[in-house]
Amino acid sequence: MLDSSHLTIESLHPEDAESALPELIHLLQNTVAGGASVGFLPPLSAEEAHQYWNNVFQEVAQHTCVLLVAHHEKRIVGSVQLALATKPNALHRAEVQKLFVLQNQRRQGVGRALMQAIEQVALAHERTLLVLDTRQGDVAERLYRSLDYHEVGVIPAYARSAAGTLDGTILFYKEVQP
């Protein structure tokens, strides 16, 4: 069982990429292997995961994305991203993306801690409207509802699962206040 008092959350920056990439690649591969609907299908190669994280660090360098990681006992056990809208009429909003938690760390508060931290990051960037989506029926759906995200609607047959079925996605939003 994870001791949440030993959980730390920090932002990663482009200069952190080289040292963090092995753990981030493992995190993504583990998440995909565990059935999470995060844009990839198993098996996910290390090369594909490496390219994904390189792209994320490019977005971080461009200041269009914030990457948070959760550490437990000096190991990365989870991550989440905040994609900052860049259009002039959208500078008040952001999209919460890619909440990843290692399979053996799930249901221990890591995802909740990352979500609470990303809301604080959003406020620090003056973003008061957050949007996200998740696979319909996924455990993440319960997490987002418990954090007061409001369902907008369902898009049926949105993403292919590892089993080959087409699953719906639920769109959520939350207004956050300082």
Image (cartoon, rainbow, N blue to C red):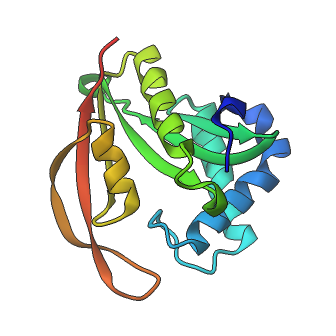
Taking depth in this image into account, of 1 and 91 the one nearest to the observer is 1
Please state the horizontal and vertical placement of residue 69, each as a whole percent of the image. Answer: 64, 39
Please state the horizontal and vertical placement of residue 137, each as a whole percent of the image. Answer: 29, 66
Taking depth in this image into account, of 5 and 33 the one nearest to the observer is 5
Q: Quadrant of residue 73?
A: top right
Outermost residue, bottom side: 164
Q: Quadrant of residue 110?
A: top right
For the C terminus, the quadrant is top left
Outermost residue, front side: 1
Q: Which residue sits at x=64%, y=35%?
A: 4
Outermost residue, left side: 153
Q: Quadrant of residue 49?
A: bottom right
Please state the horizontal and vertical placement of residue 70, each as a whole percent of the image. Answer: 65, 39
Taking depth in this image into account, of 115 and 173 the one nearest to the observer is 115
Outermost residue, right side: 19
Q: How many marks?
A: 0
Q: Which residue sits at x=32%, y=23%?
A: 91
Decide if residue 147 is on the left or right side of residue 51. left
Residue 13 appears in view:
no
Please state the horizontal and vertical placement of residue 133, each as a whole percent of the image. Answer: 32, 53
Decide if residue 76 is on the left or right side of residue 157. right
Decide if residue 155 is on the left or right side of residue 113. left
Residue 86 appears in view:
yes
